[in-house]
């Protein structure tokens, strides 16, 4: 059995393999604003939170106007700007745990929970009853409900703590200061001290977190029920969840003609970009671009324990293959970013599917296949990544045309994509998965050999084999 059947169950007729087209590069990074990169990649965070595309951008639009009304200076507004865009940076880290606790699609769970007032026992109880163990047998549902009833407070703190800590660490890794990190870490604190993870109250809560929480809820309710619903919900939570001063600022600015109209998708990125304080615009250099790719790869890999370190390993294996094929160091650096971000679209796939211990059904398999297109669509939002996006998004294409999402074949698949594909398959085989343990390197390479020149480029496979003695052992894949 070849690797194709073992991992993906893909089939297709074999075709002659043509040489891949020569690689091409993207624009110079010094021409790009950091806000464009972070704003574009925030669409990936929207996916894993189950929010309509552009949620983080819309929250940024709302929050920046609140900050302006409150009189924040340029430095403070700059910190607020990035805290709003990155408020969900830790969101993937509790996805697997939510699925374990509730069952079902954790993205829908997260989406619906954002409309719940956690300080209302009635609302929380109704939410748990509606979302615990969907489709499960009555006995199993009752066991879930009892666990959530007995340990609900402790579990909620655990989930929020995980999200907050991971989000703040990602923000720091991206090079932002303590004010941005604090805004992300304290996102779930409430004005009356009944929030999490530390139970901060009043002005002890960082201003960026106070504004971000309000902006998040305002956008959620606006998306569901329009301007009136957003204003009503924000006002209802005044003094409990929200800083009264921030609420007054929101109610003031949201009365302006066109405020909510500006949240429409058309031109949203440009409108949000215009809110960045001109004196604090940050331009991206090569080093920072590397850090961004690494940080968002961590967000992706945090979604499931079975993908822990996957993107980093694929990037390392891809670099090994590329250097063996005598690719220039400049191109290897470009390829590494594509490899790090190749699975960013998996943030849009439920852990109920990613972590399923058994065989996927047809609908689940179709959902998995969408991640490749998600990856391309997200990366294509960054002007610098216009060439990288299709290269990364095609990592499940096959030389014989039997892959996805576009059924590309032969010369339509670039050498860079072929390299990422070989690296991705090698890591998928030699790392543990929900349905099996890690496969030894020799056996994995033998399985890949059966797909030579049908799914895999023989040159890439030979380069991988030549370096196999120095590659990570399966036991090293565990967190």
Image (tube, rainbow, N blue to C red):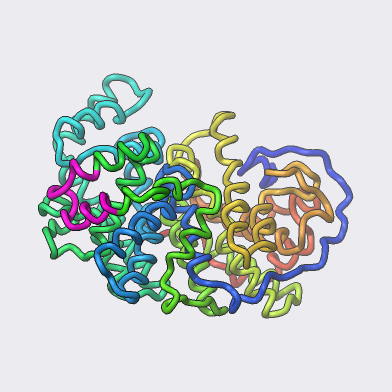
Q: Residue furthest top?
A: 138
Residue sitting nearer the eye, 247 or 52: 247
Residue occupying the point 75% across, 77% down: 326
Residue 21 point in image, percent of width and height? 83, 63
Q: Residue at x 58, y 69 (%)?
A: 316
Pick the residue in front: 66 or 27.
66
Residue 73 against residue 261 in the figure, above or below: below
Quick check: is 238 in the magenta stretch? yes
Examine the rendering and report whether any part of residue 304 can be seen: no
The answer to whether residue 145 is above or below residue 184 is above
Q: Quadrant of residue 24?
A: bottom right
Relative image position of residue 426 (x, y in whole percent)? 62, 57
Q: Which residue is found at the position 57% from the left and 46% from the top?
A: 371
In the picture provided, is 300 more to the left or to the right than 93? right
Q: How many marks?
A: 0
Q: Residue 408: x percent and y percent?
A: 77, 47
Secondary structure of the magenta portion, mostly?
Answer: helix
């Amino acid at each position: 059995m070849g690797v194709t059947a073992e991992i993906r169950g893909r089939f297709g007729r074999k075709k002659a393999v043509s040489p891949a087209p020569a690689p091409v590069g993207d624009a110079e990074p010094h021409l790009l604003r950091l806000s464009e990169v972070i704003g574009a990649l925030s669409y990936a965070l929207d996916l894993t939170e189950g929010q309509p595309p552009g949620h983080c951008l819309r929250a940024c639009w709302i929050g920046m106007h609140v900050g302006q009304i409150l009189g924040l200076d340029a430095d403070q507004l700059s910190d607020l700007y990035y805290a709003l865009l990155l408020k969900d940076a830790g969101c993937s880290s509790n996805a697997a745990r939510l699925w374990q606790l509730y069952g079902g699609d954790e993205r829908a769970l997260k989406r619906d929970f954002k409309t719940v007032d956690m300080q209302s026992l009635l609302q929380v109880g109704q939410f748990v009853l509606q979302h615990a163990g969907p489709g499960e047998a009555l006995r199993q549902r009752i066991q879930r409900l009892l666990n959530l009833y007995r340990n609900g407070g402790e579990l909620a703190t655990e989930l929020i703590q995980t999200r907050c800590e991971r989000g703040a660490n990602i923000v720091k890794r991206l090079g932002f200061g303590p004010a941005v990190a604090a805004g992300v870490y304290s996102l779930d604190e409430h004005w009356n001290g009944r929030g999490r993870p530390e139970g901060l109250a009043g002005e002890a809560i960082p201003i960026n977190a106070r504004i971000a929480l309000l902006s998040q809820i305002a956008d959620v309710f606006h998306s569901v029920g329009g301007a009136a619903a957003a204003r009503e919900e924000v006002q209802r939570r005044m003094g409990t969840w929200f800083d009264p001063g921030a609420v007054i600022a929101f109610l003031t600015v949201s009365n302006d003609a066109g405020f909510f109209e500006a949240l429409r998708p058309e031109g949203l990125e440009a409108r949000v970009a215009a809110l960045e304080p001109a004196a604090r615009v940050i331009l991206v250099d090569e080093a920072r671009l590397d850090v961004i790719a690494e940080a968002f790869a961590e967000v992706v890999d945090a979604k499931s324990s079975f993908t822990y370190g996957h993107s980093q390993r694929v990037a390392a294996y891809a670099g090994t293959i590329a250097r063996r094929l005598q690719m220039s160091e400049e191109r290897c650096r470009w390829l590494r970013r594509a490899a790090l971000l190749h699975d960013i679209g998996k943030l849009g796939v439920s852990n109920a599917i990613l972590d399923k211990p058994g065989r996927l059904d047809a609908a689940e398999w179709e959902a998995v296949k969408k991640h490749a297109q998600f990856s391309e669509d997200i990366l294509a939002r960054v002007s610098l990544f216009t060439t990288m996006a299709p290269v990364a998004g095609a990592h499940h294409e096959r030389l014989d045309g039997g892959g996805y999402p576009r059924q590309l074949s032969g010369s339509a698949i670039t050498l860079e994509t072929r390299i990422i594909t070989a690296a991705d398959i090698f890591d998928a085989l030699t790392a543990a998965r929900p349905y099996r343990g890690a496969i030894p390197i020799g056996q994995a390479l033998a399985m890949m050999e059966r797909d030579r020149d049908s799914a895999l480029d023989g040159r890439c496979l030979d380069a991988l084999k030549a370096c196999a003695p120095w590659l990570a052992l399966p036991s090293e894949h565990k967190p």
